[in-house]
Image (cartoon, rainbow, N blue to C red):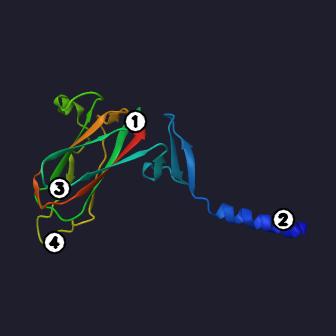
């Protein structure tokens, strides 16, 4: 009977162990942060910071000039990645999105280029279809990786401006990734 119970216990342990997310490990970074990383890799695209926050913002019509806002829920962080996905095809000119950080308690009168989240190539562009061979349609994802002025604190607001340059009334979902510093 003891061997039978030991065997059942061993099977239970094997079953429990097989449900683990194999291949992922914790890594302590030089700056004190921690990431989940894929086993055997050392690339940042396979690293997922612990404590990341994902903010979703629905832009009801990216082809209309407008401002949208979302509040940071964490202190001492940075905006690390922004993705957009369009619900349908936009045409004409690309839609351009501008992101700015507005300090807690400040009004939108304090918006300048000094608080614009930047990267090496310019502002975020959502690609419009300009000819019949266009492949940008519903479900197309565009990305923006900030490299400057992307620090953010709890209670600070991210202002998102659309330039309204494209045509077709198209909903767009933004996902803004904020990571602890």
Q: Nearer the viewer, mark 1 or mark 2?
A: 2
The residue to which callout 2 is attached is: 6
Q: Is residue 114 above or below residue 88?
A: above
The residue to which callout 1 is attached is: 77
| Label 2: which secondary element | helix
Q: Nearer the viewer, mark 3 or mark 1?
A: 3
For marks 2 and 4, the one nearer the N-term is 2
Measured from the top left, where is residue 67 in percent x and y? 18, 44
- Identified at 28% across, 29% down, the residue is 103
Q: Give the Cα distance between marks 4 and 3.
A: 24 Å
Q: Nearer the viewer, residue 109 or 79?
A: 109
- Identified at 51% across, 53% down, the residue is 41
Q: Nearer the viewer, mark 2 or mark 4?
A: 2
For marks 4 and 3, the one nearer the N-term is 3
User: Residue 104 has which mark?
Assistant: none
Are the residues flagged by discs 3 and 1 in contact, CB closer than 8 Å? Answer: no
| Label 4: which secondary element | loop
105 relative to 50 in the view: left or right: left
Q: Give the Cα distance between marks 3 and 2.
A: 62 Å
Whether residue 162 can be seen here: no
- Mark 3: few/some/many CA within 10 Å (<14, 14-19, 20+): some
- Mark 4: few/some/many CA within 10 Å (<14, 14-19, 20+): few
For marks 3 and 1, the one nearer the N-term is 3
Q: Is residue 42 above or below residue 158?
A: below
The residue to which callout 4 is attached is: 133
Residue 3 picture quarter: bottom right
Q: Give the Cα distance between marks 1 and 2.
A: 49 Å
For marks 3 and 2, the one nearer the N-term is 2
User: Residue 61 has which mark?
Assistant: 3
Residue 68 picture quarter: top left
Q: Give the Cα distance between marks 2 and 4.
A: 65 Å
């Amino acid at each position: 009977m003891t061997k039978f119970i030991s065997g059942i216990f061993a099977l239970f342990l094997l079953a429990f162990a097989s449900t683990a997310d194999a291949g992922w490990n914790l890594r302590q970074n030089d700056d004190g942060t921690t990431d989940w990383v894929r086993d055997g890799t050392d690339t940042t695209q396979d690293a997922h910071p612990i404590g990341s926050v994902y903010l979703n913002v629905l832009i009801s019509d990216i082809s209309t000039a407008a401002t949208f806002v979302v509040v940071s829920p964490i202190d001492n962080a940075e905006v690390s990645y922004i993705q957009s996905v369009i619900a349908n095809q936009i045409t004409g000119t690309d839609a351009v999105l501008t992101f700015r950080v507005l300090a807690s308690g400040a009004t939108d009168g304090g918006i300048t280029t000094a608080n614009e989240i930047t990267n090496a190539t310019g502002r975020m562009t959502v690609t419009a279809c300009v000819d019949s061979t266009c492949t940008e349609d519903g479900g197309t994802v565009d990305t923006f990786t900030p490299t400057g002025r992307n620090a953010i604190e709890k209670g600070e607001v991210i202002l998102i401006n659309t330039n309204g340059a494209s045509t077709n009334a198209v909903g767009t979902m933004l996902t803004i990734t904020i990571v602890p510093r």
